[in-house]
């Protein structure tokens, strides 16, 4: 009875183990087929996955056949055994092909080629003889070739690792796990040698199935062979661990269901209690799997891939990009973020040439041997404007899915910042063009009025006319010198107004009295250049000009908490003349709107002693003392 229970447990464990192995091998095959479309991906990866699939498929069919009660000599079981060991024999060939890429010395490359040829011939001969023995019912040779297959795999891996793998030229994960799997296979071969060859009776070969539950773990570890050029390594590990944990839970339930410990609960006298105990154990394992799945996946990911917190890294990059004001600042931030976060040897951002015009936004290009392993296109302005070339370190695995997704995030943030800088530059150019156009409207009016005054003085007072011409030249020298400047200081603006009003005084004579009231702290405040001249001109032309008798003009500047307050006040004809002031007021309002949107204002109010008071509130520039 006990032996029957042990046999049932053995078959259940074998069935679970090969099912898990088949799922993991199938997952690996799907991912390697996806990766095969990428440049530089070894075709040996696909053969590696196919061998794992065939290996587990043979074991799975054999386990199903054994559960159904088929004879150990049936064609189904023998064919399944042949598939199982054929996969094992051929499995060593793609591993050798992958390892050869790490051979850097001339003797390593030569010896690796010789070993590969010998392994291909040996694997071919073993496979042909195995299938020939099966079809001719030569069972002694058939089972004897099983042990030869195991020795072949162990010897090929041992020699391949010794020839091709060097710590200095092999990524750490690949190096450690390659030697780990090689040692495991070699120990298995020694165990078979110590225990004797597999005999004709099928029952003697059941020791091979005893290791079935370990097969998924072996394939998971073997997946590290592919990490150097395997983009989906993190996905493979994450899902493989889940499958393996589920298989482990199922195995524990299967063993417990047939085990003596559970039967003590009353499997004979109280079968209901036995079923309840097994069900309770299964529920507890499933519940623990639910809680342990995510932490274990994170632990595996952190242990083998050294993943950084990409959300934090992306936030930090976004903050730095917001402070970047030039394309070189953007490039520096992107390169440093990619290099430090992913532990890269190098990361360079450069303008995209015509060779990259066909790339799509979000596409990743892996290069084989061109100085950089991965190209990440950066879309800006509706096209691929730049590329980020990154080179992984020689001491770490190649880039995997999570890391490439982070590079896509970096590229997207970079493109958005470049678009923002381009829009800001375009807006600045538009603003400057608008300001030049608005300021150009002032000059003809000012020149016309000044020339009229000089023409009158030429007849009445030639000497004063000469002085006026010199002053006019000084005014236009100031205008021409500052024609490209958007902002000027309050002090410079007041100096310009004094020169300008010295010309107007010649026209008004004793009728015009001018006063300046400028707070000393306001001298250095930045304001739009020539912003007060239209207001002063309007006060003279429409306020004080029509007024009989003398008139007063007050120009003041004060600092308020967040603004500079500028004021032009006259005691002329009052607000009834506002409608006539047209162009000057419109010009000032448009310039304020262009420069400050709704953060600046222009207002007209009645003066305290009559006349009109024009007030400008202009936002203080960043960096000015409050």
Image (spheres, rainbow, N blue to C red):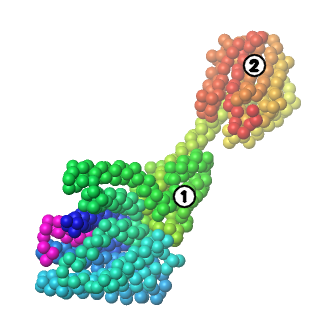
Earlier along the polypeptide chain: callout 1 or callout 2?
A: 1
Relative side of 154 to 571, left or right: left
Percent coordinates x, y for residue 311 in the rendering: 50, 49
Characterize the local packing of mark 2: few (<14), some (14-19) or many (20 or more) Cα atoms within 10 angstroms.
Answer: many
Is residue 495 visible in this depiction of the protein? yes
Is residue 476 visible in this depiction of the protein? no
Characterize the local packing of mark 1: few (<14), some (14-19) or many (20 or more) Cα atoms within 10 angstroms.
Answer: some
Percent coordinates x, y for residue 249 in the rendering: 32, 57
**Residue drawn 50% across and 68% down?**
396
Q: Is residue 398 above or below residue 534?
A: below
Q: Which residue is mark 1?
A: 341
**Residue drawn 83% across and 22% down?**
515
Q: Is residue 351 above or below residue 588?
A: below
Q: Which residues are magenta?
A: 52-73
Q: Is residue 399 magenta?
A: no
Relative side of 615 to 320, left or right: right
Q: Nearer the viewer, residue 331 or 134?
A: 134
Q: Residue furthest front?
A: 269
Circle 1 SS class: helix
**Residue drawn 30% across and 52% down?**
282
Percent coordinates x, y for residue 97 in the rendering: 37, 78
Q: Is residue 71 magenta?
A: yes
Q: Nearer the viewer, residue 348 or 260?
A: 260
The reply to whether callout 1 and callout 2 are in contact (CB within 8 Å) is no
Q: Nearer the viewer, residue 254 or 592?
A: 254
Q: Nearer the viewer, residue 427 or 281?
A: 281
Q: Is residue 535 above or below residue 316?
A: above
Q: Which residue is mark 2?
A: 569
Which quarter of the picture shows residue 467? top right
Quarter of the figure that contains the N terminus: bottom left
Percent coordinates x, y for residue 448 in the rendering: 70, 29
**Dominant secondary structure, magenta:** helix
């Amino acid at each position: 009875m006990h032996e029957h229970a042990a046999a049932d447990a053995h078959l259940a464990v074998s069935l679970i183990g090969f099912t898990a192995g088949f799922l993991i091998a199938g997952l690996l095959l799907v991912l390697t087929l996806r990766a095969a479309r990428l440049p530089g991906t070894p075709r040996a990866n696909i053969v590696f996955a196919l061998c794992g699939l065939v290996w587990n498929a043979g074991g799975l069919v054999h386990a199903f056949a054994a559960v159904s009660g088929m004879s150990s000599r049936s064609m189904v079981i023998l064919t399944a055994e042949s598939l199982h060991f054929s996969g094992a024999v051929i499995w060593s060939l793609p591993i050798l092909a992958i390892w050869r890429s790490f051979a850097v010395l001339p003797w390593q490359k030569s010896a690796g080629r010789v070993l590969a040829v010998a392994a291909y011939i040996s694997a071919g001969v073993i496979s042909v003889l195995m299938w020939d023995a099966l079809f001719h019912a030569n069972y002694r040779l058939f089972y004897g070739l099983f042990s030869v297959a195991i020795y072949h795999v162990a010897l090929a891996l041992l020699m391949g690792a010794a020839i091709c793998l060097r710590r200095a030229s092999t990524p750490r994960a690949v190096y450690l796990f390659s030697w780990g799997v090689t040692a495991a296979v070699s120990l298995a071969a020694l165990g078979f040698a110590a225990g004797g060859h597999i005999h004709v009776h099928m029952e003697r070969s059941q020791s091979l199935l005893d290791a079935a539950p370990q097969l998924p773990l072996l394939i998971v570890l073997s997946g590290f062979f592919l990490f150097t050029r395997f983009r989906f390594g993190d996905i493979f590990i994450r899902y493989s661990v889940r499958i393996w944990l589920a298989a482990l839970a199922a195995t524990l339930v299967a063993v417990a269901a047939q085990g003596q410990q559970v039967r003590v609960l009353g499997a004979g006298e109280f079968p209901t209690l036995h079923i309840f105990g097994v069900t309770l154990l299964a529920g507890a394992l499933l519940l623990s799997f639910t809680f342990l799945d995510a932490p274990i996946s994170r632990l595996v990911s952190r242990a083998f891939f050294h993943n950084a917190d990409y959300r934090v890294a992306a936030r930090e990059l976004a903050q730095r990009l917001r402070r970047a004001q030039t394309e070189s600042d953007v490039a520096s931030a992107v390169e440093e973020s990619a290099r430090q976060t992913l532990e890269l040897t190098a990361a360079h951002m450069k303008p995209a040439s015509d060779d990259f015009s066909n790339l799509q936004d979000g596409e990743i290009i892996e290069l084989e041997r061109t100085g950089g392993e991965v190209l990440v296109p950066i879309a800006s302005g509706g096209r691929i404007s730049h590329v980020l070339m990154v080179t992984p370190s020689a001491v770490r695995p190649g880039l995997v899915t999570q890391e490439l997704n982070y590079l896509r995030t970096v590229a997207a943030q970079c493109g958005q910042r470049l678009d923002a800088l381009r829009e800001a530059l375009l807006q600045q150019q538009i603003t400057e063009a608008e300001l030049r156009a608005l300021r150009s409207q002032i000059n003809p009016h000012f020149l016309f009025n000044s020339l009229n005054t000089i023409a009158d003085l030429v007849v009445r007072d030639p000497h004063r006319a000469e002085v006026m011409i010199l002053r006019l030249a000084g005014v236009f020298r100031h205008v021409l010198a500052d024609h490209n400047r958007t902002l000027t200081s309050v002090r410079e603006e007041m100096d310009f107004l004094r020169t300008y009003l010295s010309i107007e005084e010649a026209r008004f004579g004793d009728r015009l009295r001018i006063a300046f009231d400028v707070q000393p702290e306001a001298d250095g405040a930045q304001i739009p250049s020539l912003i007060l001249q239209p207001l002063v001109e309007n006060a003279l032309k429409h306020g004080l000009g029509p007024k009989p008798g003398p008139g007063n003009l007050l120009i003041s500047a004060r600092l308020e908490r967040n603004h500079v307050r500028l004021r032009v006040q006259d005691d002329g004809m009052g607000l009834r003349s506002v409608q006539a002031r047209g162009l000057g007021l419109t010009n000032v309002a448009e310039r304020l709107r262009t420069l400050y949107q709704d953060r600046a204002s222009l207002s007209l109010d009645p003066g305290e002693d009559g006349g009109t008071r024009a007030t400008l509130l202009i936002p203080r520039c960043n960096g000015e003392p409050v």
